[in-house]
Amino acid sequence: MLFTEPILFTVSLYNAFIYGMLYLFLTAYPIVFQLGYKMAPGVAELPFFAMIIGQFFGGAVCIYYEKEYNRQLALNNGKVVPEARLPPMIIGGIAFPIGLLWFCWSGYYHDKVHWMCPVASGVVTGFGVILMFIPSFNYIIDSYLVFAASAIAGMTFLRAGFGGAFPLFAEFMFDAMHVNWAGLLLGLFGFLLVLFPIAFLRYGKQLRQKSKFAFDLN
């Protein structure tokens, strides 16, 4: 399913990229705050709290958006509307690379930019992470219904692979490209991936109608 279902593969790739980026931040934050801003090893990890704050905001938006999804569900006679899950994911897909670029470029110029600037970027990054994670799971579940467990298993497999791989090259990448250009590369890739949920918002139903596993109950 993972490699034969376009919806599952691309959403899983998107989900896995974001998951890998979370692990990559475990390398990037100490580089910026410990090596750049000369914070003590324990203090250099405290900026992660900004990301947690952003995740709370993102979770609040997801909860609030359920009202809109329930409205779409009612208009569709109680049948699932997978594409109605995508708007928060698109918002998160835009917010995350913005936060990433903000962090990497402000953190690179640590001799000119106050440390609160890259710290504040974590709020935007965390906000985007949750708005991509939760809707992506819901979209896959609504799309595959009785095959949802298998679909989520495929997504988890790919996500775990990215989570294991990203820390292996993160330090080398930041050393070779520096934080700013490495962040630009990853940020541009993040902006590119947001095209997938936008495309599914328009063509998702047609793809599900051609799938052997996805359900179209509309």
Image: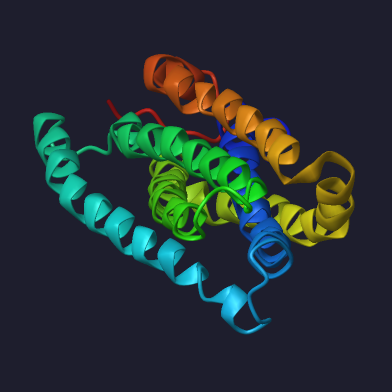
113, 118: nearer the viewer: 113
39, 29: nearer the viewer: 39
Question: Which residue sits at x=67%, y=59%?
Answer: 32
Position of 160 relative to 10 (above/below): below
Position of 193 relative to 139 (above/below): above
Q: Is residue 5 visible?
A: no
Question: Which residue sits at x=38%, y=28%?
Answer: 216
Position of 44 relative to 123 (above/below): below
Query: Could you say where residue 150 lies in the image, as x and y percent from the top left?
Result: 60, 53
Question: Which residue sits at x=63%, y=52%?
Answer: 111
Q: Is residue 194 left or right of residue 153?
A: left
Q: Is residue 100 left or right of residue 142?
A: right
132, 50: nearer the viewer: 50
Q: Is residue 137 visible?
A: yes
Q: Is residue 30 left or right of residue 119?
A: right
Can you say which quadrant of the picture contains the C terminus? top left
Query: Could you say where residue 180 lies in the image, as x and y percent from the top left?
Result: 69, 39
Query: Count the marks: how many?
Result: 0
Question: Which residue sits at x=89%, y=43%?
Answer: 176
Query: Could you say where residue 113 lies in the image, as x and y percent from the top left?
Result: 53, 49
Query: Could you say where residue 23 lies in the image, as x and y percent from the top left?
Result: 68, 61
Colouring of the image: rainbow
Residue that protrudes farthest toward the bottom in the picture = 42
Q: Is residue 88 left or right of residue 31?
A: left
196, 1: nearer the viewer: 196
Quarter-of-image position of residue 37:
bottom right
Can you say which quadrant of the picture contains the N terminus? top right
